Amino acid sequence: MQIVLATRNKGKIRELERIFAITLPSVELLGTDSFPELSDIEESEDTFEGNALLKAREVSRFTQLPAIADDSGLAVDHLGGAPGIYSARYGGVHGDDQANLEKVLREMVGITNRSAQFVCAAAFVTPSGFEKVIRAEMAGQLIDHARGVNGFGYDPIFVPDGFSETSGEIAPDIKDSISHRGKAMRALAELISAEREKWA
Ligand code: ITT
């Protein structure tokens, strides 16, 4: 069975390949780079779930294969949930992890409430019209300077609850076991296996 991973984010692709090697070992994962004619998808919805479904629908329609998409981001309590669905472009340029992280650090100077959550909506869509979306979160605290070279995005400034290292310092397999993406994708993988007769 082939499933297309509907993302261009290399940090996500690394995590998804690790997670699905364990949860869906019989599946061949294809990246969107196997479909060079696929154009960029505008994330026009105002929720993580809406954008995840939108990306999975578009890629499944275009490739005529089942597709998995993730819409994710960081929600900071003091910032009213920002950067939220705008996490990938918070600093102005889409995918500029350093600029995004520095903007959050600037906005949090002197702020004592440093609680935040990573959020992931994971969507599975097939050409036959089967659709599921699952949301999961990882709670933690923001620190005031970047630490660690693992992971991507805001990982170097986020310490998950129960840890003293940032998610940019902890080992990748440990991050997978507690992360928003790990939890959402494992639940999605279980559902894909359990409900196979409904969509295959
Ligand atoms: P695709 O739409 O192609 O999947 P994208 O990077 O645009 O890639 P999103 O719109 O879902 O994806 O934005 C996700 C952003 O949220 C990502 O660029 C990071 O800044 C942040 N983010 C999400 N998960 C993260 C994680 O596990 N660790 C650190 N930052 C994360």
Image (spheres, rainbow, N blue to C red):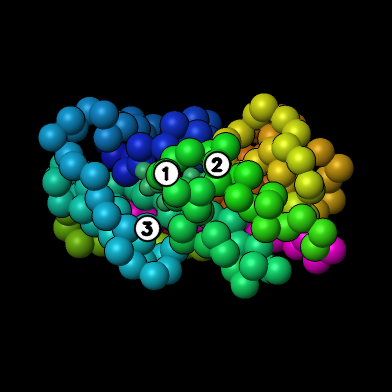
- Answer whether labels 2 and 3 touch (C-beta < 8 Å): no
Cα gap from disc 2 to disc 3, whole angstroms: 24 Å
Q: Tag 1, which secondary structure?
A: loop
Taking depth in this image into account, of 200 and 88 the one nearest to the observer is 88
Q: Residues within 10 Å of mark 3 (few under 14, many from 20)?
A: many
Could you tell me what secondary structure mostly forms the magenta stretch?
Answer: strand
Residue at mark 3: C-beta within 8 A of ligand 1: yes
Q: Tag 3, which secondary structure?
A: helix
Task: Residue under label 1, please give it.
Answer: 93
Question: Which of the numbered marks, if any, corresponds to residue 52?
Answer: 3
Decide whether residue 198 is among the magenta residues. Answer: no
State left or right for residue 194 relative to residue 107.
left
State left or right for residue 96 relative to residue 169.
left
Residue at mark 2: C-beta within 8 A of ligand 1: no
Hey, what amino acid is under mark 3? Ala
Label located before the other in sequence (1 or 2): 1
Cα gap from disc 1 to disc 3, whole angstroms: 20 Å
Task: Residue under label 2, please give it.
Answer: 99
Hey, what amino acid is under mark 2? Ala
Q: Residue at x 60, y 50 (%)?
A: 103
State left or right for residue 90 relative to residue 94.
right
Label located before the other in sequence (1 or 3): 3
Q: Residue at x 46, y 58 (%)?
A: 86
Cα gap from disc 1 to disc 2, whole angstroms: 8 Å
